[in-house]
Image (cartoon, rainbow, N blue to C red):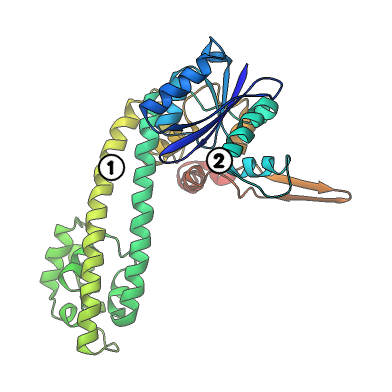
């Protein structure tokens, strides 16, 4: 067996190759891309014949480089950068650091401690595609919420009536009304009929007239007014934010449709969909983050540890403390929380628990 450490970067990668006794066999800097990968294969071929004899440590579990290493048949271990930083301290306290040195640290880590780390999972291409789509969908939703929070802060400065009219600023009807009336003066000129048309075009079907009257009443309410010049400037900012939010919502809907189609094609979709509270979006996120490699987790506890739902215990002397696990995969923790919340309404067992 030989151990390989790769300190990756955007345009080049530092590589260190060790034997089983820790002796340095080769050290190279290779470029990113096909040429660099060919050089790496050539260096490794000089040492071993079977790709399964190559153990690779790298600080990421995704990307073209990692995919190519797995496809070549190497045993690839994705090591958390924080663990690499702690491991570096085992070999020196002076604080020296270099890319070539980090590559050697990674190689030595997989030589001595690979049993403490998880190999890059052999998930199917469909599962990887679902993961990409689910993360992109999640990113856009988080971006929309951040922008909606910025819009709320802007409206608070000059247009409190809009905040009274709409609890959710990213909703289609809120965006439709704010696009037509980004300032208080224009909002007060809207009639109930105008609002009925806007809400209808935004997709509202139930209690349309009643909702339009409620919005009209909120916009007509007496409020403190900013100077006209400032109100127009704030209104331009609101119109720009509304335009971006509208585009984001359209792209989120488009990604949702693609994600649903891909998720429904997966063999595990029926099983995941049968679990209380787990629909298409949450199911796709859970599947993408857990993966579909049946050998990825040794047991249920390993899966809970990865999900961050298992507590951690700190015991020293007579003191013993059990804490929540905050260092975890946020992309997985978020859908798990929503899954638990949604299960309360459709599962008597979940409600009882």
**Crowding at mark 2 (Cα within 10 Å: few <14, some 14-19, many 20+):** some
- Give the residue pinned by disc 2: 99
Q: Could you tell me which quadrant the C terminus lies in? A: top right
Q: Position of residue 131 (x, y in %)?
A: 40, 35
Residue placed at 49% from the left, 23% from the top?
293
**What element does badge 1 sit on?**
helix
Residue placed at 32% from the left, 26% from the top?
265
What separation in Å lies between label 2 and label 1 (alpha carbons)?
38 Å
Residue placed at 23% from the left, 83% from the top?
231
Q: Residue 91 got which mark?
A: none
- Do the numbered discs 2 and 1 sit on residues whose CB atoms are within 8 Å? no
Q: Position of residue 27 (x, y in %)?
A: 56, 29
**What element does badge 2 sit on?**
helix
- Give the residue pinned by disc 1: 255
**Crowding at mark 1 (Cα within 10 Å: few <14, some 14-19, many 20+):** some
Q: Position of residue 232 (x, y in %)?
A: 19, 81
Work out whether residue 274 can be spotted. no
Q: Could you tell me which quadrant the N terminus lies in? A: top right
Tell me if residue 188 comes above or below residue 75 in the rendering.
below
Residue placed at 68% from the left, 50% from the top?
95
Tell me if residue 95 comes above or below residue 266 in the rendering.
below
Q: Position of residue 331 (x, y in %)?
A: 47, 44
């Amino acid at each position: 067996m030989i151990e390989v450490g790769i300190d990756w970067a955007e345009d080049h990668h530092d590589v260190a190759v060790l034997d089983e006794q820790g002796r340095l066999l080769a050290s190279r800097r290779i470029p990113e891309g096909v040429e660099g990968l060919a050089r790496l294969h050539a260096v490794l071929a000089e040492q071993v014949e079977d790709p399964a004899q190559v153990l690779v440590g790298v600080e990421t579990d995704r990307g073209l480089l990692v995919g190519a290493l797995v496809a070549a048949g190497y045993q690839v271990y994705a090591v958390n950068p924080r663990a690499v930083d702690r491991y570096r301290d085992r070999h020196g306290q002076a604080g020296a650091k270099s890319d070539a040195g980090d590559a050697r640290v990674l190689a030595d880590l997989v030589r001595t401690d690979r049993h403490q780390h998880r190999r890059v999972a052999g998930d199917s291409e469909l599962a990887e595609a679902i993961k990409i789509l689910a993360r992109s969908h999640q990113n856009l939703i988080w971006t929309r919420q951040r922008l909606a929070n910025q819009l709320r802060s802007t409206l608070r400065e000059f247009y409190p009536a809009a905040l009274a009219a709409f609890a959710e600023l990213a909703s289609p009807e809120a965006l439709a009304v704010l696009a037509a009336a980004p300032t208080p003066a224009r909002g007060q000129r809207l009639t109930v009929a105008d609002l009925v048309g806007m809400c209808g075009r935004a997709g509202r079907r139930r209690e349309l007239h009643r909702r339009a009257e409620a919005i009209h009443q909120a916009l007509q309410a007496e409020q403190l007014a900013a100077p006209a010049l400032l109100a127009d400037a704030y209104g331009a900012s609101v119109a720009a934010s509304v335009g971006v939010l509208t585009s984001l919502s359209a792209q989120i809907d488009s990604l949702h449709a693609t994600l649903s189609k891909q998720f429904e094609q997966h063999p595990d979709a029926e099983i995941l969909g049968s679990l209380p509270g787990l629909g298409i979006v949450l199911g796709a996120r859970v599947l993408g983050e857990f993966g579909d490699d049946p050998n990825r987790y040794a047991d249920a506890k390993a899966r809970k540890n990865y999900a961050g739902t298992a507590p951690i215990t700190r015991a020293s002397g007579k003191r013993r403390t059990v804490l929540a696990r905050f260092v975890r995969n946020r992309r997985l923790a978020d859908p798990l929380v929503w899954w638990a919340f949604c299960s309360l309404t459709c599962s008597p067992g979940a409600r009882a628990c």
